[in-house]
Amino acid sequence: MKKRTIKNISYWSSSKKTGYNDEANIKIYIKSKNGRDISRVNYEEQEILFMRNSKFRCEDKSVINGICRIFLTEI
């Protein structure tokens, strides 16, 4: 698989919490470099915020039991 770079021009957020949405058919796992933990604002969300123009490299992707898993590394 060719590793692709993604640049997100808007803010992007994710959760540290596993099982945030157990019914999701797409799950994205991010190895963060500069993401900001803002869980002190809302502990229930366990949110990580990524700034505008953050770049990510797609390391791998797979589909298992109908669930697409995407693995990204912030660069």
Image (cartoon, rainbow, N blue to C red):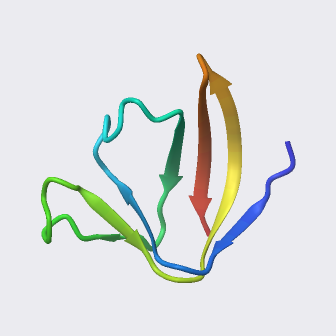
Residue 69 quadrant: top right
Tell me if 53 is positioned left or right of 3 in this view. left
Tell me if 74 is positioned left or right of 22 in this view. right
Return the residue found at the far right.
2
* Residue 47 sits above or below residue 50 on the image: above
| Residue sitting at x 13%, y 68% | 40
| Residue sitting at x 31%, y 38% | 18
Point out residue 68 in the picture as x, y percentages from the top left corner: 62, 33
Point out residue 74 in the picture as x, y percentages from the top left corner: 57, 65
Residue 38 quadrant: bottom left
The quadrant the C terminus occupies is: bottom right
| Residue sitting at x 53%, y 33% | 25
Closer to us: 31 or 66: 66
Tell me if 56 is positioned left or right of 16 in this view. right
* Residue 20 sits above or below residue 14 on the image: above
Point out residue 44 in the picture as x, y percentages from the top left corner: 14, 53
Tell me if 27 is positioned left or right of 18 in this view. right
The quadrant the N terminus occupies is: top right
